[in-house]
Image (cartoon, rainbow, N blue to C red):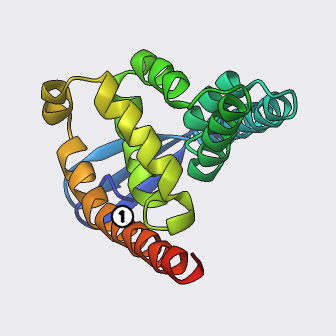
């Protein structure tokens, strides 16, 4: 009985069985209501809503409706699904002869700052793996070219997230520099 600070000396249940009254050595009488059924119904409703949203996400991905899929993936707070959708958006743009940045900038311009912070947090996590670093850097580029630096600096947690991205980005760029340098050696050897 968390409501009491000392021993509980008396308990009584109401006639309908929905209310419990307790009295304790702390000189308090507390009325408790049974909310188990309401909590279970709320949990079940939340689970049903999540299942429906996940199905909608799968449907949008199947029909290549990436914009709607992105919003659902972000609403469900699923970073790997969000990564998959963002990769699909960029690949779709590349197939159409675009660079993908414009579409990402359009999305970023519509996001509230908490959604932008959520995506930056995902980018920080994605950037820890080399194979996800390209899309993470492209999304970060879309964010920093769309939202003014002053607004990003004032946003709660964004400067720290961006600082967390920097070491891995430096490592990825160093790896790319080494690959380019190695390709020059190969060119020199072959030609």
Quick check: 166 left or right of 190? left
* Residue at 69% across, 39% down: 91
* Element assignment for label 1: helix
Q: Quadrant of the N terminus?
A: bottom left
92, 121: nearer the viewer: 92
Image quadrant of residue 88? top right
Q: Quadrant of the C terminus?
A: bottom right
Quick check: 174 left or right of 36? left
* Residue at 50% across, 52% down: 134
Q: Position of residue 168 (x, y in %)?
A: 34, 66
* Residue at 87% across, 34% down: 62
Image quadrant of residue 8? bottom left
Q: Residue furthest bottom?
A: 189
* Residue at 38% across, 49% down: 121
Circle 1 sits on which residue? Answer: 173
Visible residue check, residue 184: yes
Q: Position of residue 172 (x, y in %)?
A: 39, 67
In the displayed structure, would residue 87 be above or below residue 170? Answer: above
In the displayed structure, would residue 169 be above or below residue 109? Answer: below
For label 1, count other residues whose C-alpha is less than 10 Å away and answer few (under 14), some (14-19) or many (20+).
few
181, 126: nearer the viewer: 181
Q: Position of residue 162 (x, y in %)?
A: 25, 49
67, 101: nearer the viewer: 101
Q: Residue furthest front?
A: 191
The number of callouts visible is: 1
Visible residue check, residue 15: no
Q: Position of residue 25 (x, y in %)?
A: 23, 61
Quick check: 17 left or right of 144? right
């Amino acid at each position: 009985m968390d409501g009491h600070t000392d021993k509980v000396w008396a308990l009584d249940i109401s006639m309908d069985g929905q209310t419990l009254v307790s009295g304790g050595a702390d000189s308090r009488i507390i009325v408790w209501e049974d909310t188990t059924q309401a909590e279970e119904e709320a949990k079940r409703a939340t689970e049903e809503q999540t299942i429906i949203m996940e199905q909608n996400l799968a449907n949008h991905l199947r029909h290549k409706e990436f914009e709607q899929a992105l919003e659902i993936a972000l609403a469900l707070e699923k970073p790997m699904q969000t990564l998959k959708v963002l990769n699909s958006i960029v690949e779709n743009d590349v197939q159409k002869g675009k660079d993908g940045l414009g579409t990402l900038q359009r999305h970023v311009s519509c996001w509230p700052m908490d959604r932008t912070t959520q995506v930056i947090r995902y980018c920080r996590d994605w950037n820890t793996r080399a194979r996800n670093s390209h899309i993470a850097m492209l999304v970060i580029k879309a964010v920093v070219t769309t939202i003014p630096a002053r607004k990003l600096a004032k946003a709660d947690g964004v400067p720290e997230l961006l600082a967390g991205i920097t070491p891995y980005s430096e490592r990825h760029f160093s790896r790319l520099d080494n690959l380019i340098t190695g390709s020059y050696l190969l060119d020199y050897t072959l030609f």
